Image (spheres, rainbow, N blue to C red):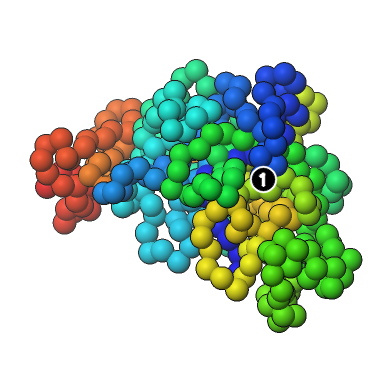
Amino acid sequence: MTIRFVTCFMIAGCAIGGNDTTSGDQDIVGGFPARSEKFDAIGMLYGVRSTGPAPICSGTLIGPHTVLTAGHCVHPSGAPFNIIDRFPVFFAIGYDSAAPTKRVRAVWGGETTVAGNDVGVYELEEDVEGVTPIAFSDAPLTDADIGKKAWIAGYGLQDSGQNFLQFLTRRAAKFDITTFEAKPLAVMFPDFATFKTFMETNAGKSFTDAQVSILWDLNEIRPGDVWVGKPNAPQASYLDSGAPLLLNVDDVLTIEGVNVRSYRADPTVPTTGTNKDMLPVGSAVAMVGIDGTREFVDHALTDPCRNVTSNGHCSATLAVRCPAELPTPIVTTLDCADLGTTCAVDASGVAGCQ
């Protein structure tokens, strides 16, 4: 009944950093171009499959080689594997993800062990030079933050003609921090009938009470989440999963969480992967400053092995290790495809080319 986003999208262009972001005509979902290099910490994660490269999610550089994103952008819901175990994953930097200024390969991906908190990270093979990381908050938002303005920036779908297999440009929009209530719709609409009318107007069709109840009765906010946005305001879309929720405190931007879920515009039909699938009422954000997740992200930032073990692992054809036999911890990689072999883990548990 909910939709997962993949990659980034919004933030009210000129709202952050004064004139550094160019604003333009509003598109269907309500965002603005975010062209400034000061936002290059926010990039697109994409994978390379046998059929070619495909976007995964939005992400934000929070350290020299650590990208914060949504947990389901690392481990898809219900999948028995992490994406990086099957396909090469890259972080594309720059306003236009189809023509990035640089690409860096990821060597590890993981998600917090905190149940229900949809936060993940990718560790990159190389440090990203020339891009200033954005710090994350070490504490969760509280009721005192309700009503504040925050921003989301990413590479989500900007009009109904796009789909989530396209590489897109970075957009930005401003959002209200709305509620911690499990059922955000009951906060944003005075009653069921008003919401039903809104839903039917948006979809251009009638629904039964039972069909509307699929959304109305949904507990969309989990412990560690917060709802941002409101009806008929800017709306995050597909490929905005993992995009950062940014708060400006004393002229310092901090990441409060990552964009993770929204309501289906029409729960009676399959999703098609365009922004018309999203009900324009906002989205859930998984906060990064909660106990457990904060420690998980801190470890990713400080571990010299970037969460890579001594025995290592395979990411498609790439063998990745942090060898214990070396005097200084360093991540080493070897693309077995260059040797005409495949990557595999041997009987002793060590990844290598076979």
Residue 128 image-quadrant placement: top left
Q: Residue furthest right?
A: 190
Residue 294 image-quadrant placement: top right
- Please tell me whether residue 129 is drawn above or below residue 104 in the rendered image: above
Residue type, numbered disc 1: Val
Q: Where's residue 156, x and y in %?
A: 56, 44
- Please tell me whether residue 35 is drawn above or below residue 48 in the rendered image: above
Question: Callout 1: helix, strand or loop?
Answer: loop
Q: Is 327 positioned to the left or the right of 155 in the image?
A: left
Q: Where's residue 43, x and y in %?
A: 51, 34
Q: Is 185 or 300 nearer to us in this picture?
A: 185
- Please tell me whether residue 309 is drawn above or below residue 226 in the rendered image: above
Residue 311, visible in the rendered structure: no
- Please tell me whether residue 292 is drawn above or below residue 211 in the rendered image: above
Q: Where's residue 283, x and y in %?
A: 68, 54
Q: Residue at x 74, y 56 (%)?
A: 281
Q: Is 101 positioned to the left or the right of 351 in the image?
A: right
- What residue did someone put label 1 on? 29
Residue 347 image-quadrant placement: bottom left
Quarter occupied by the N terminus: bottom right
Residue 90, visible in the rendered structure: yes
Q: Is 240 or 109 nearer to us in this picture?
A: 240
